[in-house]
């Protein structure tokens, strides 16, 4: 889980981001490409025996609250200016862990790395307008992703987004997920990383 701290006058409200049920790897971080290969394998350094990735967390300003259906979010953003916010700036975490022997171990390792962020604060000044919260995993390092640099499509490992939310009105957890019915969801990860909400 990741935490958002919403500061309003003297009161601070804590909102938790979650990637779903504990012990289950979120679908957005166990996608396969069209050849059936896990995207998580892109983060594997076989020579070093490690998995290295960067996890970016950012906010997409929506200007309104469409439903959570990808088609409706896409239609809304075609008519409105949905853009990645620079205030608050996105947050990046460099993550690394030992790698097992096969490709499926890379998926497990990526899932465990994402889970390791439980309790980490994302921002103490979360946005007050309607937003979608997004988490992008890429086989790059945070130093290569300064400013508004878009992750390299060929190195994307996973992606998940929230439904459109007004954070001041949230009580409890906010789920980040990738809307897909299949683990052959590499195109969905790319769309997510580019802020395109339509289903591939």
Image (tube, grey):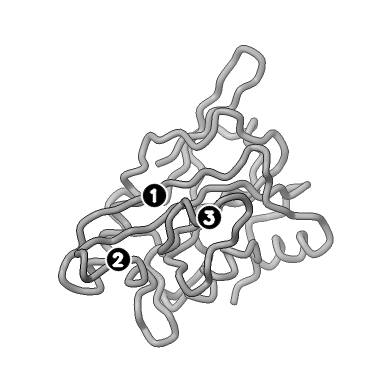
Q: Are marks 2 and 3 in contact (CB under 8 Å)?
A: no
* Among the two numbered marks 1 and 3 on one chain, the one whose residue lies closer to the N terminus: 1
Looking at this rendering, what residue extends furthest in the top direction?
Answer: 10
> What is the number of the mark on residue 168?
none
Can see residue 28?
Answer: no
Percent x, y for residue 147?
61, 50
x, y percent for residue 155 = 45, 70
Residue extending furthest toward the front: 143
Using a 10 Å C-alpha cutoff, classify the residue at mark 3 as few (fewer than 14 neighbours), some (14 to 19) or many (20 or more). some
Residue at (37% x, 67% y) in the render:
30
Q: Residue at x 74, y 55 (%)?
A: 82
**Spatial separation of the CA atoms under disc 2 and disc 3:** 23 Å
Numbered marks: total? 3
Nearest to N terminus: mark 1 or mark 2: 1
The residue pinned by badge 1 equals 94
Q: Quadrant of residue 117?
A: top left
Q: Quadrant of the N terminus?
A: top left
**Crowding at label 1, few (<14), some or many (≥20) Cα neighbours within 10 Å?**
some
Q: In this image, 40 relative to 9: left or right?
A: left
* Image location of residue 47, percent across then percent down: 21, 70
Residue 33 visible in the picture: yes
Task: Give the residue at the far bottom of this rendering.
Answer: 35
Secondary element at tag 1 = strand
User: Can you tell which of label 1 and label 2 is closer to the viewer?
Assistant: 1
Residue that numbered label 3 is attached to: 145
Asked if residue 134 lies left or right of residue 77, the reply is: left
From what the image shows, is residue 63 above or below residue 198? Answer: above
Residue located at (68% from left, 46% from top): 85
């Amino acid at each position: 889980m990741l935490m958002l701290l919403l500061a309003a006058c003297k009161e601070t409200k804590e909102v938790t981001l979650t990637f779903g049920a504990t012990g289950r790897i979120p679908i957005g971080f166990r996608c396969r490409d069209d050849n059936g290969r896990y995207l998580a394998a892109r983060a594997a350094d076989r020579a070093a025996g490690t998995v290295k990735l960067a996890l970016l967390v950012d906010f997409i300003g929506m200007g309104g609250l469409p439903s959570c259906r990808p088609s409706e979010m896409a239609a809304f953003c075609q008519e409105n200016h949905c853009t990645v916010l620079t205030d608050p700036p996105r947050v990046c975490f460099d993550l690394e862990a030992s790698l097992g022997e096969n490709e499926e171990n890379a998926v497990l390792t990526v899932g465990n790395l994402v889970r390791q962020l439980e309790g980490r604060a994302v921002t103490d000044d979360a946005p007050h307008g309607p937003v979608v919260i997004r988490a992008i995993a890429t086989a790059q390092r945070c130093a290569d992703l300064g400013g508004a640099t878009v992750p390299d499509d060929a190195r994307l490992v996973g992606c998940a987004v929230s439904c459109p939310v007004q954070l001041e009105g949230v009580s409890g957890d906010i789920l980040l997920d990738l809307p897909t019915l299949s683990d052959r969801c590499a195109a969905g990860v790319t769309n997510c990383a580019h802020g395109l909400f339509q289903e591939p």
